[in-house]
Image (cartoon, rainbow, N blue to C red):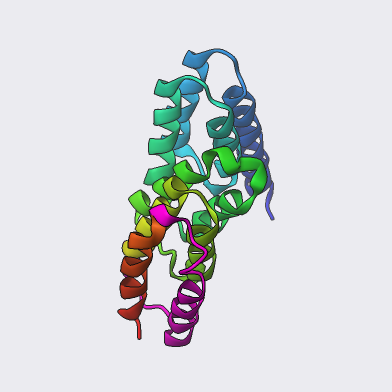
Amino acid sequence: MDKQSSEKSKKKKTQEQIWTERLSSPNQEVVRETIKEIRDFGNIKILPAVIERFASEKNEGVKNELAKLLMDIKRKEAVGIIFSYVQNDQYCHIRKDLLSILWQSRMNLSSYINELVDLFISEPFDVAFEAFTVIEYIEQPVDKQIAQENIDKLKLHIQTIDESKKFLLVDLVNLLKRWI
């Protein structure tokens, strides 16, 4: 690596650290300015800091700006990062929001069908509905065997699933059948 590349690399790391610190600021205006900078110049490495601020944010305006930033990310690497927060119980208070962000972003979540069906089965209605919506918006093909396994799993839970989700369960089975 030449000297110029090395300096550029250090500068980039320094910028991510600056953004992370600024995202942690109690000053809402500093956070808003940082969100704008990240939107214009950020990279995928800053995503955990953005999600951390989203998880702790009390101001609805700032929270909405963070959500819009997350929805606008189109990098496929972002799916795994965001979904790791969906699955982490420490972030269960934003699970519904993160699922909503994922389906609104139109990222490819076809490889997360098993996890989405599990969330549909185990979570309360509001989170289950978002998981259902994510599956509904998946445009990429899903392996036939995986789709069938999830249909079987849903049928197995028909008697034990919360009554409020039963009507959606039938629709979810039909959604999964499109890949068979």
Q: Position of residue 38 (x, y in %)?
A: 48, 34
Q: Where does residue 166 sit, x and y in percent of width and height?
A: 38, 61
List x then y, in percent, for residue 25.
60, 18
- How many marks the image carries: the answer is 0
Tell me the quarter of the picture where residue 137 sits. Answer: bottom left
Residue drawn at the location 60% of the way across and 54% of the way down:
87
Front residue of this view, candidates 35 and 129: 129
On screen, residue 172 above or below 119? below
Visible in this render: residue 75?
A: yes
Magenta-drawn stretch contains 144:
yes
Taking the spot 57% from the left edge, 26% from the top edge, the residue there is 23
For the N terminus, give its image quadrant. Answer: bottom right
Task: Answer whether residue 73 is visible to the viewer in this image.
Answer: no
Q: Is residue 109 above or below residue 128?
A: below
Residue nearest the observer in this picture, 133 or 1: 133
Residue 180, compared with residue 27, is above or below; it is: below
Q: Horizontal and vertical percent for residue 28?
A: 50, 15
Taking the image as shown, residue 132 lies to the left or right of residue 83, namely left
Left or right? Give the position of 93 relative to 128.
right
Quarter of the image where one finds residue 141: bottom left
Name the quadrant of the C terminus. Answer: bottom left
Where on the picture, by quarter, is residue 106? bottom left
In the picture, measured across the screen, residue 37 lies left or right of residue 48, that is: left
Q: Per the image, is 163 magenta?
A: yes
Magenta segment: 137-164
